[in-house]
Amino acid sequence: MKKEFDHEKIKEAVRMLIRAVGDDPEREGLVETPDRVARMYDEIFEGMRYTNDEIAEMFGKCFEDVNTSDLVLVKDIEVFSYCEHHLALMYNMKCHVGYIPNGKVIGLSKIARICDMVSKRLQLQERICADIADIMQKVCNTEDVIVIIEGEHSCMTARGIKSRGAKTRTSAIRGLFDTDHELRNEVYALLR
């Protein structure tokens, strides 16, 4: 069930933030900023409106009676998210999602939609991996899922240590990908 954001509270919070950093929310360039931010949040935090189960239901259309157990891998799905610790942008993120079909396959665009929706939350990169893997397992009725994400975090590149170009890699490895090292190595080889 789609939950709505409280635009009035968001707008007031943005006005308070503008004042707190020493500017005037009534200044010409800023007067419409609170409304723009509230509308932007509808888009960039859309995934917060849904549980993993609801996302699985939204993007759960599969083709059934498929007689294959060969690796399916979609790589370089571009997403962005916001770090829940600093509300800072996680960017240049690429998701790689693989699975072994168990009698059905998901439409490839649905994999990208799942990655996108999960990323549109206040998140940790590690949780993005786990959420995508959990949803893929539900939708595809398979334990055999691997998700690898690489991204840059502005909480590390634009502030603090300011280590520009530093990338974080995380993975969620389930089923055969956890136990069959040759299969896991095949995925890593395909990602090179």
Image (cartoon, rainbow, N blue to C red):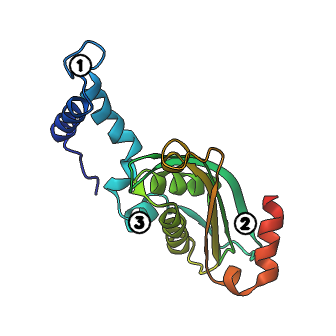
For marks 3 and 2 on the same chain, the one whose residue lies earlier in the sequence:
3
Per the image, the residue denoted by label 1 is 31
For marks 2 and 1 on the same chain, the one whose residue lies earlier in the sequence:
1
In this view, which residue lies farthest toward the front?
161
Identify the mark at residue 72; answer none if there is no mark.
2
In percent of width and height, residue 24 lies at 21, 21
The residues tagged by marks 3 and 2 sit, at their Cα atoms, a distance apart of: 22 Å
Looking at the image, residue 18 lies above or below residue 134:
above
Per the image, the residue denoted by label 3 is 52
User: Which amino acid, mark 2?
Assistant: Val
Looking at the image, residue 65 lies above or below residue 28:
below
Q: Secondary structure at mark 1?
A: loop
Q: Secondary structure at mark 3?
A: helix
For marks 1 and 3 on the same chain, the one whose residue lies earlier in the sequence:
1
Q: Within 10 Å of the Cα at label 1, are there few (<14), some (14-19), or many (20+) other Cα atoms?
A: few
In percent of width and height, residue 149 lies at 62, 59
179 lies left or right of 85:
right
The residues tagged by marks 2 and 1 sit, at their Cα atoms, a distance apart of: 49 Å
In percent of width and height, residue 111 lies at 59, 57
| Snapshot quadrant of residue 99 | bottom right
User: Which amino acid, mark 1?
Assistant: Val
Q: Secondary structure at mark 2?
A: strand
